[in-house]
Image: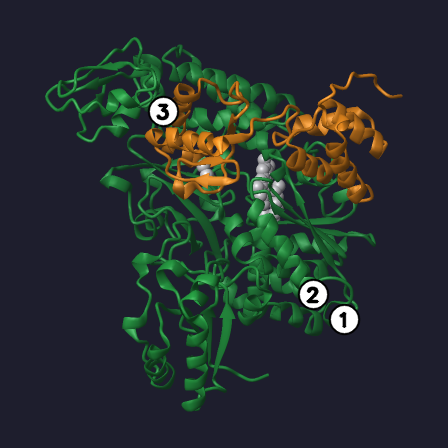
Chain colours: A orange, B green
Amino acid sequence: MLKQITIPENDPVAVPEKRAIIDQILEQNKDLPGGLMVILNEVQSQIGFISEPMQLYIANHLHVPVSAVHGVVSFYSFFTTKPRGKHTIKFCMGTACYVGGTPQLIDKARQVLGIEPGETTSDGLITLELCRCVGACSQAPVVVVDEDTHGRVRPNKFPQIVRGLQENDGK
Amino acid sequence: MAFFRSHVLVSVDPECLKRGAHEVIDALHDELVAQGLIDEVQVLETSRIGDPVFYGPDMMVYPEGIHYANLTPDDIPYLVEEHFLKGRPVERFRAQERLVRDEELRPPQPKEVRVVLRNCGVIDPNNIEDYIAEDGYMALAKVLTEMTPEQVIDTVLQSGLRGRGGAGFPTGRKWQFARQSPGDVKYVICNADEGDPGAFMNRRVLEGDPHAVIEGMIIAAYAIGSRQGYIYCRAEYPLAVKTLNIAITQAREFGFLGKNILGTDFSFDLEVRMGAGAFVCGEETALMASIEGRRGEPRPRPPFPAVAGLWMKPTNVNNVETYANVPQIILRGPEWYSSMGTEKSKGTKTFALAGDVKNTGLIEVPFGITLREVIYDVGGGIKDNKGFKAIQTGGPMGGCLSAEFLDLPIDYESLTKAGSMMGSGGLVVMDEDTCMVDIARFFMDFTQEESCGKCTPCRIGTRKILEILTRICEGKGRDGDIEQLEELCTWIKATSLCGLGQGAPTPVESTLKLFRHEYEAHVYEKRCPAKVCRALISYEIQPDVCTGCTVCARNCPTSAISGERRQPHKIDPDICVRCGICMQVCNFNAIVIN
Ligand SMILES: Cc1cc2nc3c(=O)[nH]c(=O)nc-3n(C[C@H](O)[C@H](O)[C@H](O)COP(=O)(O)O)c2cc1C
Ligand code: FES
């Protein structure tokens, strides 16, 4: 039966507004064949991550073992179990970008933010990530800031991107 | 239906409207009436042709495909008289090509033939009527009213169309298998997972001409007898997903999807499903597992999808580009299609040209064109007048080809024979400054990480190869490493479960074969001939060239550079991480690699 886990009070399933979002997604897709992927994609995009309590919650609603949900969440790199920073900067590691200077950009990011790809700044503002080719290879190297693709980013332009995010946050 | 000899598409995007697009349309209409041409020239509105900031108001005239820009109502009388009455394009109103800002898709270059890309950047993808104006859904109408499913399959067979997803399986045969498979419920799937780094052909087609793919899928569904289809699109392509959903809604409204399509008793509907960032989901059996809502792990074939696919039902899986070719083949006939290309590879192929070539971006060329023509005629040659070193084809499961293969005609068989493969169509050109061992390591890093882990050879083998390559790049290569690499490649290839593992060694094998001397230089002389591998190089500032501008010191991520303003600077090799940023930012070429 139900696996017992303690649910932190700030977990989305414990926050009524967030839970309503999850409920709505579940309701909309519960009869869809193969709906689990659709549900997880929606939850990831609307809530930003899929915590363990959320996985359990979804599994119970769909009447599938939590291991099935966890198996899917852990398989796909788009699904994260922890919240990301407010903004995400992704470095394209595709062939064109790799050859075009992504490694240098990461060096620069390390210097400017003091974190490695996969980590979030201590103020929770920026998460760095590596990603696969985003299909904008003719503009290599490519950096994806939240939803926006920036092409031909030179290392000395990188601090501007970070400043842009920091200033926006101040407003 | 009236027969128009010309179609004029006028852009009515907000910026063009602000600049008087409606006045231009009114003037055009009045003038066509005045000159008695209104029954011969059709004026249509479209949302965007060129960048309106540069061109607005602008219009496109077909069949010539002439782009007139920055028009005012006063220009129209002259334009109509010259172009439509006397048949003389007016040069001074034409858009200046050099202003075209679409870097991914330039106007066709020499030797290009556009079939799949014909509408991309030309029509408004969010307006089905634009597509219809380009003969859209005419092939579907023809198929549903004049052809039996068997005739459709025969036509595709005769055209010689082969799958564009990589393996090049004849599409007609695939459809035949799916048709012959017993079962009431069958599925049609479009593989839009385009995971190969360096490839973005499918994305542009989905974003620029979604209806061509949808129409191709409906025709396939009719041919095999399916009522439900899925487009599996990778999550990295949110715009493509959005465009597809709009297109599907519009196609339903127009009666091209849904129940009783075009009043016949054929029904079919489509749904877009999104991936979530797993490369292996491009493999068809993994893709189907993912649509079913499971981990995207491949399974052994047979049974092939045509027999037991999605939810164990007969399923036809084709690539985006494969489907996009179909309507044209139906409309223009299989003979037209098979007149392009080589004996065994018919038609055209889109490629994403990237890397160290002058004109990067999407191209579409007939099969049989040589690599040299692609790089030098279509691509404009190597950037910065450097020398050509290699071209990578086929993505992470393809290989690198050296200069001796430049005159190789591009088709499925030739590339495979040369030790690479067609793949989905990424072409990455590498200049003399590229280290082939580093490239092999890069691809291994990719496949190692994307290996789903289900089978041992792929999971363990790729990791082992990566270890050795990393060691070699770090200057710690040992005697016997090269031989061990060769052994591992053979073993992984022979024993892996799916195409990912079977193809993973190709980048290593092909570079070992063609660039063995580079491996040897790394292992035996601890030297990186291309001066790329960080452990084997050092950066130095030439004191007589350095002006002391301080730009390198300010940009160095590890503060390894010191020096007074206006005095030659120096790099501390112990702190330097050899990232090369200083060399990139130096305006005086004062920094050299040893
Ligand atoms: C690891 C791996 C990745 C693949 N990725 C893709 C892909 O991104 N797009 C694609 O169309 N086919 C991909 N394929 C090929 C598909 O399995 C399948 O052959 C193809 O979709 C069939 O369509 P086609 O006959 O139109 O080429 C991949 C195969 C393997 C083994
Ligand atoms: S390699 Fe970076 S966008 Fe394709």
Pointer 1 residue? B264
Q: Secondary structure at mark 1?
A: loop
Q: Amino acid at mark 2?
A: Glu
Q: Is residue B144 left or right of residue B480?
A: right
**Which percent across, then down, holds residue B462?**
54, 22
Question: Extreme top residue here?
Answer: B574
Q: Amino acid at mark 1?
A: Thr
Pointer 3 residue? B516
User: Is the residue marked by circle 3 packed among few (<14), some (14-19), or many (20+) residues within 10 Å?
Assistant: some
**Which percent across, then down, holds residue B196?**
51, 38
Dot 3 or dot 1: first in sequence order is 1
User: Is the residue marked by circle 2 packed among few (<14), some (14-19), or many (20+) residues within 10 Å?
Assistant: few
Report the residue at 40% width, 73% height from top.
Answer: B64
- Compared to residue A35, the image places residue B486 above or below, namely above
Q: Secondary structure at mark 3?
A: helix
- Compared to residue B54, the image places residue B355 above or below, namely above
Q: Say which of B573 and B306 sits in front.
A: B573
Residue at mark 2: chain: B
Q: Which mark is residue B253?
A: 2
Question: Extreme front residue here?
Answer: A171
* Distance from Cα at disc 2 to Cα at disc 3: 59 Å
Report the residue at 75% width, 62% height from top.
Answer: B258
Residue at mark 3: chain: B
Q: Is residue B564 left or right of residue A17?
A: left
Q: Amino acid at mark 3?
A: Arg
Report the residue at 58% width, 45% height from top.
Answer: B238
Q: Is residue B579 left or right of residue B172?
A: left
* Distance from Cα at disc 1 to Cα at disc 2: 16 Å
Q: Say which of B576 and A94 sits in front.
A: B576
User: Is the residue marked by circle 1 packed among few (<14), some (14-19), or many (20+) residues within 10 Å?
Assistant: few
